[in-house]
Amino acid sequence: MHVMEQGSVQEHGRSRKLSKIWVINERVRVGLAEALSTYVMMVFGLGSVAQVVTGRGAFGEYLSVNLGFGLGVAMGVHIGGRVSGAHMNAAVSFSMCLFGRLGWRMLPVYILCQLIGSFLAAGTIYSLYYDAIYHYCGGNLTVSGPKATAGIFATYPAPYLSLHAGFLDQVIGTAMLLLCLMALSDQRNQPAPSGGEPITVGLLVLLIGVSLGSNSGYAINPSRDLGPRIFTAIAGWGPEVFRAGNGWWWVPVLAPMVGGVTGASIYKVFVELHHPSPCEHRREIEDEAAPLDMQKNLSPEVCV
């Protein structure tokens, strides 16, 4: 009896160890995919900005930036979509946690890996365009002015934009992002076609850029903005990256969080909560498919 109890305790201990190892491995697997997805998205996005700025318009224009970020998002979803969901955006991860689609314990993993991915992407673009940046600005790394280059990496408000208007700008932009993402993933509505999710999400980001981007560069993503901003502070632009725009830096960090929850809530209240139950939906399909004379004889079913 004692031997059996001891064996049971040992087996339980092994199960707990295996469970802990599985949890650690799962976090590593998801975190690596999320970091790489974010890195790829940001390399293409920041690279498109660097090319436009340092090329003085010879190698693209504002639409090039929108296309760079939109297609970069699509590639990021291809890389991590089936592993981490390829959020690539702290506001998306936070909203998914709030609506029960992601465990809260995973939120720090997602945000940390997104920040690492965006920080490394900023370093990659800085290295790749180092000579072009210094040639463009004459070696004077500035945040504002006619030869400013900090905007290659992080977003800054237009001169006319106040902080409260910029906050609203980011709330609305991110709300539209999450509202549409909720719709694209709603299997009981009109979701993105299977296999077409990456390009559909990329087109959504492109749409936001060409319609809501001119005020402040449509960050709509704390991870996209904060990681590169920290990089520029270290790489030579200094603390001015946090002071510029009347201390703008916190707006693209906090406002997208508010906007993400707002947009997801709007979709849930206006659409998702009003879907018929699976039983009702099935009955409607059966009724529509049945011949007219048979429908008269159909008895109501009880769906358990």
Image (cartoon, grey):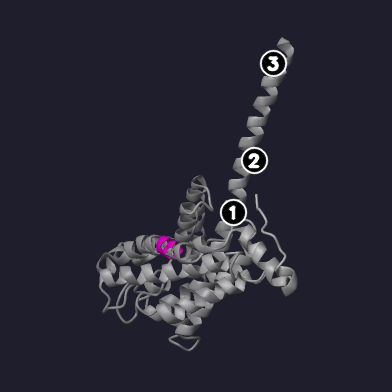
Side of 183 where 137 appears, left or right: left
Residue 6, disc: 3
Q: Where on the picture, by quarter, is residue 199?
A: bottom right
Q: Does dot 3 land on a helix, a strand or a loop?
A: helix
Decide whether residue 37 is among the magenta residues.
Answer: no
Of helix, strand and loop, which mostly describes the magenta segment? helix
Question: Can residue 261 be found in the magenta stretch?
Answer: yes
Q: Secondary structure at mark 1?
A: helix
Q: Quadrant of residue 6?
A: top right
Looking at the image, which residue sits at the far bottom? Answer: 58
Toward the top, the furthest residue is 2
Highlighted range, magenta? 260-265
| Residue occupying image coordinates x 27% and y 78% | 159
Give the residue type that dot 1 points to.
Leu
Q: Which mark is residue 32?
A: 1
Horizontal side of 300 relative to 86 (left or right) equals right
User: Distance from label 2 to label 3 (Cα)?
Assistant: 24 Å
Say whether disc 1 or disc 3 marks the residue closer to the N-terminus: 3
Q: Nearer the viewer, mark 1 or mark 3?
A: 3
Name the amino acid, label 3: Gln
Q: What residue is shown with label 2?
A: 22
Q: Which mark is residue 245?
A: none
Secondary structure under tag 2 reads helix
Vertical relation: 223 (above or below) 63: above
- Whichever of callouts 1 and 2 sits on the residue coming sooner in the sequence is 2
